[in-house]
Amino acid sequence: MAQQHLDPTDPTAAQVTGDALAGYLRTQAMEFLRALRLHRETGGADPGRARSRAGEHGADESVDAARALRRSARRISGSLHTFRPLLDVDWSERMRPELAWLSGTLALEHAYAARLDRLLTALHRLSGATAFPAQSTGAAVGGRSAGAERVGTAEPGTAGPQSHPTPTTANGAKEAPLNAPPPAERANLTVGAAKAGALLDRQLTLARTRAHSSALQALGSSRFHAVADSIAVLASEVPLTRAAPTTALHPLATAAEERLTDAVAALPLLTAGHPYNAEALIHGLSPDPAPHPQDAPWHQVRLLLRLHRYAREVLHGEDAVDVSLLSASQALDLHRDASEAAAAAASAARTPRIAPATAYALGVLHADQRHEVEAARFAFQRSWQKQTVGTS
């Protein structure tokens, strides 16, 4: 593991060289191999076996192992990108796309599950419900979709919640009925919102199932085994250039930081610094089904910030956490999640022959997630401002 060093601007500080990079890469390779072994031991290649051997605990361990695999793969890939002049060119250029493929493939299942949970939670919140319904993990069961179970509303064609007449006072104002059931016993979502939840559940559960199958196929493929073999070699031998062991890492890490700073400078941070600016809602009614164009620069900053954080880990060790950078990174993660959730709601709204009430609920949900995008930009602006002040 790379050791902590003094401030690189201090001329008396010890130089961090390619040896530290080699130690960091070996550590991440060992973490990758450890996670891979745990994934196999917990039946990660066979979810049914995982449940039969260790129940829910085994399934959780398998998920944690897959997350650790992604974590190590991202850090190795990021380090190869930032410090590529110090590494064998052919090996580095061959490994980077393979690690990106692996990390992206393993991330999809979790992303779809988190997106579904985020959207159903938002639907529940927008309905004004008082208690969150029990989550289900499967798709449609017995003709009743999991989404409908979560929102607690009857399926179309079945008896819904009973209505109760609302008496009025002498002046015509509505009066709360004495025999009305408490809010917790009534359906908490409108029929449109319930159908929207069921539609999102069907679409995203199907996408998650396909992503799970793709991950299993990837982990059993010769392509993955080639990646694992290369990382096993990396755990003992890092292909540095001849000059790398004595070459300082700070110029390359500084270049990564400058790329991040330039990308942040291009963002509309002045606008993002004002809450409720509605900037994220611009072009919200565009018929273009492509991802929201204004989100792309923010997504690029998120990737550059990740590279900057990994470079700092190489120089200062993983324990040297910059709180403001971590907060900024978390804000951009939320920005990405809300942006993709809004896109999923918009995509569901394009489903042919859905009822107007369902389309309306999905439109409200889309707008809600775009407001979350705006809130994440505001949070990033504040975190980045603190980070800039702290380093100036």
Image (spheres, grey):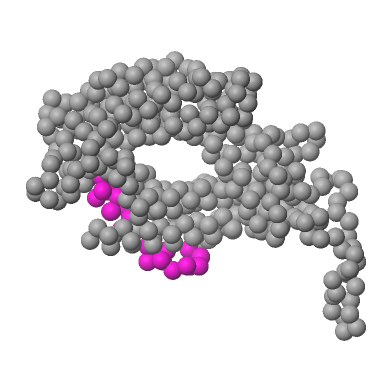
Main SS, magenta residues = helix
Q: Residue at x 88, y 69 (%)?
A: 177
Where does the image place residue 250, in percent across and percent down from the top left?
Answer: 18, 43
| 374 in relation to 159, above or below | below
Residue 218: give x, y in percent of width and height.
Answer: 49, 22
Quarter of the rendering containing residue 185: bottom right
Q: Check the picture and name the quadrant holding the N terminus.
A: top left
Residue 125 in the image: above or below residue 79: below
Q: Kindly identify the residue that appears in the image at 27 percent across and 40 percent down.
A: 317
Outermost residue to the top? 222
Counting from the top left corner in percent of width and height, residue 340 is at 53, 47
Tell whether 64 sits left or right of 327.
Answer: right
Residue 128's image quarter? bottom right
Residue 13 % position (x, y): 12, 45
The residue positioned farthest toward the bottom in the image shown: 171
Please identify the residue farthest to the left as the structure is shown: 12
> Which quarter of the figure is the C terminus placed in?
bottom left
Q: Is residue 213 magenta?
A: no
Q: How many discs appear?
A: 0
Q: Is residue 271 magenta?
A: yes
Magenta-highlighted residues: 255-279
State left or right for residue 225 relative to residue 253. right
Q: Is residue 359 visible?
A: no
Quadrant of residue 84 within the rendered picture: top left
Q: Tell me if I can see residue 8 in this picture.
A: yes
In the rendered view, tell whether residue 88 sits above or below residue 350: above
**Residue 382 horizontal side relative to residue 246, left or right:** right
Residue at 33% across, 62% down: 385
Viewer-side residue, 375 vs 364: 375
Residue at 43 percent across and 59 percent down: it is: 379
Given residues 196 and 234, the one toward you in this image is 234
